Image (cartoon, rainbow, N blue to C red):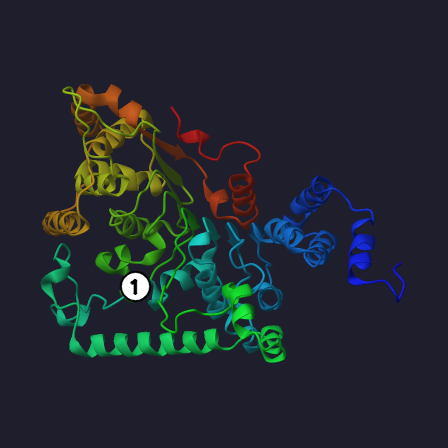
Amino acid sequence: MPQNGDGPLDIAIAQANKPRLPPELLEQIVKEHALPCIYGDPIASSTLAACSLVNRTFRYWSLSARFAVIVAPRHVRDFRKWYARSQNDMQGFNRALFIALDDVSKLTSMSAGWDVEMLKLLQQQGPHLLHLSLWNSETRALLRDPAQIRGARRMVKQMRKGKLVQGEALSAIPLKSDFTNRNEAQTRAEMAAAKERARQTLPNWLRLELASKEAAKEVKRRYKAHISADARDVEIDWACMPEKLSICPSLPLHEHEEPLNFARMTIWTRVKELDVFVSVPSEVPRCLELISSLVASPLIKFRFSSINASLLISLTPNGQRVSDEGLQQPDINIAHGLQKVLQSHVLRSLLFDEFNNHRIPDIGMLERAIASMIRQSTCTSAMESTRAYGQERASTKEKKDSRPSLASSLAFDRTLSDNDGHASEQLVCVKVLQGNQAHYGKLKDRRQDFLVRALGIGSDPWKNVQH
């Protein structure tokens, strides 16, 4: 220990001579506690929280291990306590998030407001969150959130007694009005003013540093990262835009149930892997129609499950199509391909029969027919595809519904698959799983599927898609 008469140099030399653990060992300690912390071990979580107070490097390793993959508490009260305690530390570190709360319809008023805190959590994570998995109530709160759509929404009350005519362009009604512009300008001004006030409020240690020294310029140069150089604030409003999304939607979604509003939700902006489970078979047609409107999303893998069947679609890594002349053709679009499948009266009826537990003997022909239909689809504009799909659905509704025979469906399948069946297998993989598929909606299986995909352990959940 340094004596009282030692100078600053002697103290620094004495501290430097103290034994220190190598950084490799410290990093190994953090890694050993990472997996137990993900599975909810309180000792591992407390250890990482204590390690985050050592130094900056140790803090970064500890927070990355604690919050990179998060399985939120099940009970609402525990979730609110955990959110209040961890919301400041997890920002910028969370990459995968799983939220599955208990039945919120049976909770008391003491637990009210959980949905607001959950939406705030998703908003705070912003684009750093890459993998999001939600259960029933959480999905309903997210898909009904008005903040998911920026700007004006589709005004259904102005169109034919409150009913939306499918296929109409979004420009059929004015999206912007003077009243809306004034409200948006006022909101942006208030947010900019609040951020400016927050930036001008210096930390206590920095305020004391500036007050105790006369050379304020030297202090400002030294702590330039903590002082705003420009009073003008640039507003950057991030939102939750994961690349892997697993949800359990249920109807109604109110105004977001309109295809044009549904496709404009920010949650679909960067989704590449989409996993959807619908617990009610009667809601499968409507949910598939809404998913088919996501032509602007870069979907690569898509799994749509219900209690009786599952539809799995995957694009191969070499999804770029090249013509005979060597020219690159437009990419395959899964959502647009689903629109083509739903426009076909034969494929639509056979596919919905599978979800209603009405089996067909040869499921392979249905898979090849869907793959051929998706292969013929390309990336077109959202307005054009939605308008064409609406016109087709409007004309189909005028006709009398009739269940197609199996012979006609097989003949239709041969017509599609004879020409480009080999190419479709190279570019698109389609699998229809028959039998009981209710395990995709159970909490235990969804949690395990999330951990497998987030941590990269175990078997590949998409192995059933490969032919």
Front position in the image: 403 or 283: 283
Relative horizontal placement of residue 39, taking residue 179 as reference (left or right): right
What's the residue at 36%, 72% (across, down)? 232
Front position in the image: 108 or 55: 55
Tell me if residue 361 can be seen.
Answer: no
What's the residue at 54%, 50% (across, down)? 443
Q: Position of residue 274 (x, y in %)?
A: 38, 45
Q: Position of residue 456 (x, y in %)?
A: 54, 36
Vertical order, 273 against 78 (above or below): above
Relative horizontal placement of residue 297, taking residue 11 as reference (left or right): left
What's the residue at 72%, 51% (across, down)? 44
What's the residue at 19%, 39% (across, down)? 340
Disc 1: which residue: 149
Relative horizontal placement of residue 225, taking residue 60 as reference (left or right): left
Vertical order, 399 against 317 (above or below): below
Q: Quadrant of the C terminus?
A: top left
